Image: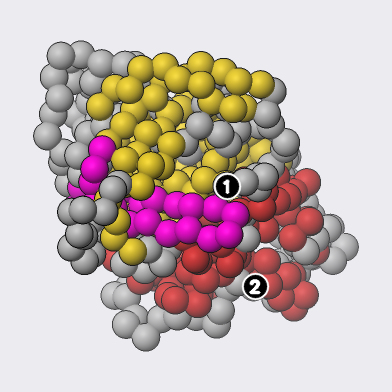
Amino acid sequence: MGWTRTTRLVALGAALAATLTACGSGGSSSDTVRPGTGPTAEATPMASQAPADPKAPVADTVAGLDAFAAAFWKASAKPGQNLVFSPLSISYAFAMLRAGAKGDTAAQLDKAFGFPAGVAQAFNALTEGLITSTAPPTAAPQPSADSDPPPAPPVVTIANALFAQQGYPLLPDFQQTLAGQYGSAVQPTDFANQQAALAAINHWADVHTAGRIKEILNQLDAATRLVIINAVYLKASWTRAFSDAGSRDFKAASGTVQVPMMKREDEDLGYAKGSTWQSVTLPYFGDRLAMRVILPTGSATPADLMTAHVLEAAGKTKTAAVNVTMPSWDFASDLDLKSLLPDLGITDVFSDSKSDLSAITAVEKLFASQAVHKANITVDRLGTVASAVTAIGVSATAARIPTVPPIEFTVDRPFVFEIVDTKTGALLFTGSVANPAAK
């Protein structure tokens, strides 16, 4: 078909679905993800990714992730409601879009996400350091209720794809950046056949999240030209399983509720505290990944803790003996990124008159018309499973002294959680729990 230089619509459909589930035995969610079974169709092939640059600005990119996470939490959190999202997945998708942006559009993305020069190389290096497999994850039945499987090495997969209108003239530099730095192969798609295009995109998400995320987008604009999509999947066991602590009181904003609790006692863990908070770092098997639980103290709330300063300070731990008692939880978030990201200064990319995505194609003007984010999380005593998909549719320790009593860390009020890469500090998932009993 011919392409004109008229202004056309670009639908930016960024949809994130994140699931954190226990690695499970009795009391675990029935939809726990494990290797072995899952979608039978083959995954979209990945492009051949370039070797990581050892000089890539990984530290600067990670600092940007932290700042974005804190700012996005404040823009999206609602009082008394649970929240979960993946800063890593959202940033991956918008970094790929950034490869096609120029002018003020590029500058706004750089500022909001903290993207340094060389961000594509940084995400390439992060991918190389984090992933345990380039194959899509697969699901398997959870163990029987009376079994307590030993911890297994974590599974982390990161996948990217570029669904493009058949015959669409992408500029070489944009295509090469997505292929070489993000491993994102071009998947020719007929967006005029909306049903088939949605089926292909949602199938990709289904495969790359082991069947956890079956629908990322439910509609596409008629002028859609591209969909950029990222999936982050994590399955990790605690180094040592929690034991059942029964039901206890949790001081939710709406009142005290009874929730299932789990505990680990007299254990050497990373611990930090500030004037309005305390935190404990719970390592996953393999010690590369960890969950950090940040608990307000005094009259502080989770909103007071979601700052780049507190997130950074919570990671500066000292080893201490800690008794941890915390709830299991299971809930979901559904966020409209198009309405939230302008609060972070991202406006031009959503404007048909101001957007500059001219590094994607030279044949027409593009802008983002859609951006959504879906997430859910389940945590219990054996570990964590997390998967996140972001789709962007472009259309027109030290030894302790035994005599020191353990620190009591009881999570009985709203709190913040993070899942981090302990080597780079990269923030894979974060959120806050206002009421563990709420879905």
Circle 2 residues within 10 Å: few <14, some 14–19, many ≥20 = some
Left or right: 243, with 357 as reference point: left
Q: Of 337 and 424, which appears nearest the observer?
A: 424
Q: Which residues are magenta?
A: 265-286
The vertical placement of 344 against 230, above or below, is: below
* Dot label at residue 280: none
User: Is residue 6 shown left or right of residue 174?
Assistant: right
Q: Which residue is mark 2?
A: 110
> Mark 2 or mark 1, which is nearer the start of the sequence?
2
Q: Quadrant of residue 125?
A: bottom left
Which quarter of the rendering shows the C terminus? top right
Tell me if I can see residue 107 in this picture.
yes
Along the line of sight, which residue is nearer the eye, 149 or 336?
149
Amino acid type, label 1: Thr
Which residue lies at the image location 18% right of the left edge and 54% below the top edge? 402
- Is the stretch drawn in magenta largely helix, strand or loop? strand
Is residue 97 visible from the viewing direction of this image? no
SS category of the residue bearing label 1: loop
Q: Nearer the viewer, mark 1 or mark 2?
A: 1
Between the residue at mark 1 and the residue at mark 2, the CA separation in whole angstroms equals 34 Å
Question: Could you tell me residue 280's position as x and y percent?
Answer: 39, 50
Q: Which residue is drawn at the image coordinates 15% and 14% (left, top)?
A: 146
Furthest-right residue in this view: 353
Residue tagged 1: 297
- Residue that protrudes farthest toward the bottom in the picture: 55
The residue under label 2 is which amino acid type? Asp
The residue shown at (34%, 81%) is: 53
| Category of crowding for the residue at label 1, using alpha-carbon neighbours closer than 10 angstroms: few (below 14), some (14–19), many (at least 20) | some
125 is within the stretch colored magenta: no
